[in-house]
Amino acid sequence: MQEPQAALYEVFARHGSEPLRHVGSVRAASPEEAGVFAYTLYDERGWSELFVVPRDRLVRVVSPG
């Protein structure tokens, strides 16, 4: 049985009432695995909210240059 292909997930977090911000990225085989990796790697501040989003699902609104 072949393992799922790992995808790149962007990690976003919020502390209290601060705006949501990008804190990093992880490579994972599923959204659940990405959540575990994100929590393990980026929970240094005890975020009130932590999100993972597959990079290929982000919609570019403005392109550089």
Image (cartoon, helix red, strand yellow):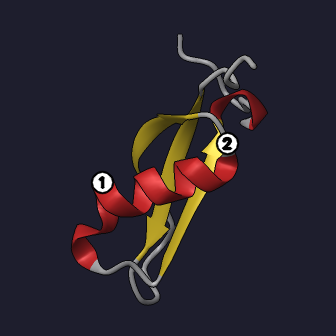
Query: What residue does disc 2 label?
Result: 30
Give the secondary structure at mark 1: helix
Which amino acid type is marked by label 2? Ser
Q: Residue at position x 42%, y 79% from top? A: 18
Query: What residue does disc 1 label?
Result: 41
Residue lying farthest to the front in this orientation? 1
Give the secondary structure at mark 2: loop
Choose between 1 and 17: the one closer to the eye: 1
Name the quarter where the N terminus is drawn. Answer: top right
Kindly identify which numbered label has been placed on residue 56.
none
Residue lying farthest to the top in this orientation? 65
Mark whose residue sits in front, 2 or 1: 2
Tell me if residue 41 comes above or below residue 50 in the rendering: above
Whole-percent x and y of residue 65? Answer: 53, 10
First in residue order: circle 2 vs circle 1? 2
Image quadrant where residue 30 sits = top right
Tell me if residue 11 comes above or below residue 42 in the rendering: above
Residue lying farthest to the bottom in this orientation? 16
Whole-percent x and y of residue 57? Answer: 77, 35
Choose between 6 and 61: the one closer to the eye: 6
Whole-percent x and y of residue 56? Answer: 72, 27
23 displayed left or right of 27: left
28 displayed left or right of 54: left
